[in-house]
Image (spheres, rainbow, N blue to C red):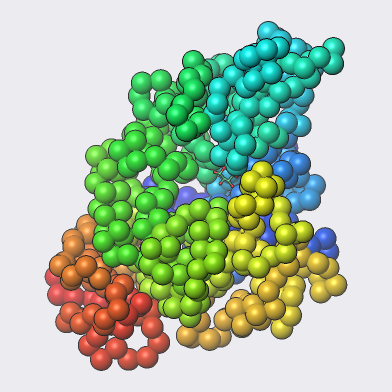
Amino acid sequence: MAAPAAHPTETISWWREAVIYQVYPRSFADSGRDGEGDLRGVTDRLPYLVSLGVDALWLCPFYPSPQVDGGYDVSDYCDVDPRYGTLADLDALLAAAHAGGLRVIIDLVPNHCSDRHPWFTAAVAAGRGSPERARFHFRDGRGTDGAEPPTNWRSVFGGPAWTRVREPDGSPGQWYFHLFAPEQPDFDWGNPEVLAEFERILRFWLDRGVDGFRIDVSDALIKDTTWPDTADGSPVIPKGDDGGPHPIYRAFRRVLDAYPGERAAVIETGAPDDVVALFLRPDEMHLAFSFRFLKAGWSAPAARAAIEDTLAANARVGAPATWVTDNHDTPRSVTRYAADTALAGAYVPDAVAGAHLDLARGTRRARAMAVLLLSLPGAAFVYAGQELGLPNVDDLPDAVLQDPVFVRTGGEVRGRDGCRVPLPWSGDAPPFGFTADDAAPWLPMPPAWRDLTVAAQDCDPASMLALYRRLLALRRSEPSLRTGTVTWLDAGPDAVVIRRESEGGRALLVVVAMGEEPVPLPAGEVLLASTPGPLDGVLPPDSAAVLAVAS
Ligand code: BGC
């Protein structure tokens, strides 16, 4: 194994206020000619991320995988899929990122693996009652000849959450549980072998120098294995102290804490705030996405409630909040905010399909939301392309769609490919520098993105990219944007006005105009505004500003 990459050392608890940039490797940059992004492509573009001003990156799964669910179906947890490169490429990426002052967290997928994972193929081959099957949830079916699934639970991707196997002798056999696609069998975390294996996997990557993990579907590792039928087929997943997955996260924390440099983990859970906070106790994980903030959409009361409740719940366990508006699972926010306010918070794919979309409005709002996102205390995530103001691509032809949701719902839900279209870097026509000019990107890129490439935005002070750079620089220079207190000033139902103060930082006001009317600006020095041009004492609708005010 290569020597671990040098580790950045300057900041303690870096994760508490980090801005972490999410890279979907398949869509970021292709260093080859196959139309799919790869790890070398990421390494080549690190100077872009350094100049953007983020603190860290999160790499979505790059592991060997049949790619049934965009790599969230892992067949080997300790290697790199040849389509993305090699372990040596990953080591080189880590070394280059650390040299540039960027930390790197990687995706850990502990709920399920691929049905091609050697543990699962061995389990199918080994038959009923074997120790191999005990690493997964195999059960006999109900009804005549066990032909009915063990429960009525439904999979998140549509269809039943159970699939029947053939036994080694060819007879119809047991059923196994999968919260997602049939090609993603769930591990049985009640089996201590599973924890031991994941501790080994964590150490494998920590030894290589990764700075932490984003933990996929982290709240769902434990199922109610009395397998009760439910009224609507929803799986029963204990999340609290009574039978939930907390001992697993305490074990993970012990592994992380044994390494220098504050290795940290962010968990993915859509649970209510008080349940999320349980995962953030000092001996569990470090950060948890606030999906409430994402789902608040373009609504001042919803944003306020999400911010206040998240901060209050996290404060009870001493954890920072983690703000996010975009990721690889939800329509891009420019498009969500382009719809009317009610739809702007919709998290599910397809929510905005058929709605009237005003992309200019969506872009103005996304600019304003960037100001709020990066002005709240705690960590924040930026999804690749968000800093370019990319819209969702909602007219991809059926033939190119790859999300298992599309197939498993019989085409009823088109899925998440629209937010995963490769990034436009330069040039006037697809593939916009993402891959070789004569190669086809794995998802077609809209010709209209010629105005949204990195190169097109680079020197334009009015661009979304320029706004993100200014915002990230301001956040670095103003401690009150990263940490400290949030005080709400009354500004009516259509505006967010918060006062931000921190020890050692100056007092700031963040104002976001979320209604139809302009918002009068309080006295103060405007440090940054989401709209180009002078403000004349009022903030136009769909915009935001940061002001320095008297302490
Ligand atoms: C990931 C999705 C994935 C699902 C199943 C989610 O948390 O973000 O992209 O489809 O987990 O692994």
Tell me what residue is drawn at x 30 percent, y 79 percent.
Answer: 516
Q: Quadrant of the N terminus?
A: top right
What's the residue at 40%, 87% (across, down)?
Answer: 532
Q: Pick out the residue farthest to the top.
A: 129
Above or below, 520 against 84 in this view is below
Residue 291 visible to the viewer: yes
Q: Nearer the viewer, residue 147 or 24?
A: 147
Q: Which percent across, then down, holds residue 349?
A: 55, 55
Task: Locate residue 481 relative to residue 443 in the image: left or right.
Answer: left
Residue 511 falls in image quadrant: bottom left
Q: What residue lies at 28% left-to-right and 65% top-to-bottom?
A: 300
Quick check: 347 left or right of 40? left
Relative to the observer, which residue lies in front, 341 or 233? 233
Q: In the rendered image of this protein, does residue 455 appear above or below residue 377?
A: below
Instruction: Kindly identify the residue that appears in the image at 42 percent across and 37 percent down.
Output: 285
> Along the horizontal axis of the image, is 504 left or right of 102?
left
Name the image quarter holding residue 491: bottom left
Residue 233 location in percent, x, y?
50, 31
Numbered label tally: 0
Quarter of the C terminus within the rendering:
bottom left
Q: Nearer the viewer, residue 421 or 36?
A: 421
Residue 255 appears in view: no
As drawn, 444 above or below 225: below
Where does residue 548 sit, x and y in percent of width and height? 23, 76
Query: Ligand 1 quadrant?
Result: top right
**Residue 288, horizontal then vertical, whole percent:** 41, 44
